[in-house]
Amino acid sequence: MAMELKKFVDFDNLTNAFAARTDEALKKANFVFSTMQSPTLVKVGSQLMEFSLNVGLPVKGLIKKTIFNLFCGGETLDGCQRATNQLAAFNVGAIYDYSVEGEKSEEGFDATTEEILKTIERAGQFEFIRFSAFKVTGLAHFDLLTKIHAGEKLSKEEQAAYARVHDRVDRICALAKKMDVSVLIDAEETWIQKPITEITVAMMAKYNTEKALIYYTFQMYCHAMLAHLKELHLHSKENGYRLGAKLVRGAYMEKEAARAEAMGYENPIQPSKEATDRDFDLGTKYCIEHIHEIGLFAGSHNEKSNYLITHYLEEFGLPRNDHRVYFGQLFGMSDHISFNLAEAGFNVIKYVPYGPIKATIPYLIRRANENTSVKGQSGRELTLIRKERARRKGLKKG
């Protein structure tokens, strides 16, 4: 579809894009994204951040004032309220995402489950957008998921542990159904994806009988994912449930490629960014073509992809605020996309991660690496932030 078509949203409107940010917040964002321009600084800074926290150096305050406050809503669910209110003032919803990773004990998995249940209860209090999100690795041993994916035989203890994982996810989805809150179950590394797929499909079949409430995540940087989207759509039709489709490009590209090379199997990642972009856009169009059977959550920081979705809605005669179509970006990133889409009347949600500073370090490092490795991401953020700072200075002088 030609990009010369009428624009339904203007991503260059900086007044809308940064309306929720103070001058001080822009100054700090400028510093963080400037740092992310250097892969060396990001690598060294990430290592220093982890080391300092592990040995107990007093760096939490510095981390909180910079990268943590930019990409996370707070350390607790209550601590996210200010960020949530700021977003809501501009008709942008919030997805509470408890971003504590790497739990290894059953007690830890149960505690994470309880926290996710709290996010659903909180989301159920919202008036216009009600979502929650989680990773299955917050509720299960990574090694157990790896073993299941590989088709290895489980011991009785492992079978019992996997049954508990199912139970945790089912508790979350049951409460979501009761509270009418949608749940995004994130995709993770491909070598643990089979059990995540199994669990998510089971939850969709059980709870998506009336509408898409539970969402499966399709990482479109995997070359098999567009076919997988169509396969699960067919499965949903044959089994009488609605497919919840969260489409993203993906978050583990370097790790996936390195493991495939080291272990001698086919790299699951697309051959190029262009191929990923193509399949992402074909995927969102496919979902909107079949919107009476699919709920779409498009998680993208790509301007062209978001433009295209606005045109797909127009092409298929759907309202901008169709309750089956949502745009999503991460907190602290791509505000020029989020706030301008919301201003134009589309459904927009920000992922708002939260958790203790030390526990969210893996998430923060991924954001730092993502902004460094994704071509133009931090550069684009930095350019817009500097333009807005200059615009505000001009207004003050005038």
Image: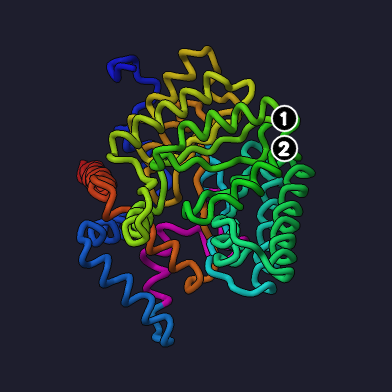
Q: Where does the image place residue 133, in percent across and percent down from the top left?
A: 59, 50
Query: Where does label 1 land, which residue?
Result: 239
Q: Main secondary structure of the magenta part?
A: helix
Is residue 198 depicted above or below 345 in this figure?
below
How many numbered marks does the figure carry?
2
Residue 242 shows in this picture: yes
Q: Is residue 174 magenta?
A: no
What is the quadrant of residue 53 in the picture?
bottom left
What is the quadrant of residue 232 in the picture?
top right
In front here: 14 or 230? 230
Quarter of the figure that contains the C terminus: top left
| Secondary structure at numbered mark 2 | helix
Q: Where does the image place residue 321, in percent across and percent down from the top left?
A: 56, 25
Quarter of the figure that contains the N terminus: top left
In front here: 203 or 335? 203
Q: Where does the image place residue 22, in percent across and percent down from the top left?
A: 38, 52
Q: Earlier in the sequence, mark 1 or mark 2?
A: 2
C-beta proximity under 8 Å, tags 1 and 2:
yes
Q: As shown in the figure, which amino acid type bears the numbered disc 1?
A: Asn
In percent of the image, x 38 and y 52: which residue is there? Answer: 265
Query: Where does label 2 land, which residue?
Result: 205
Q: How is the image coloured?
A: rainbow
The segment highlighted magenta reads 60-85
Q: As shown in the figure, which amino acid type bears the numbered disc 2?
A: Ala
In front here: 5 or 215? 215
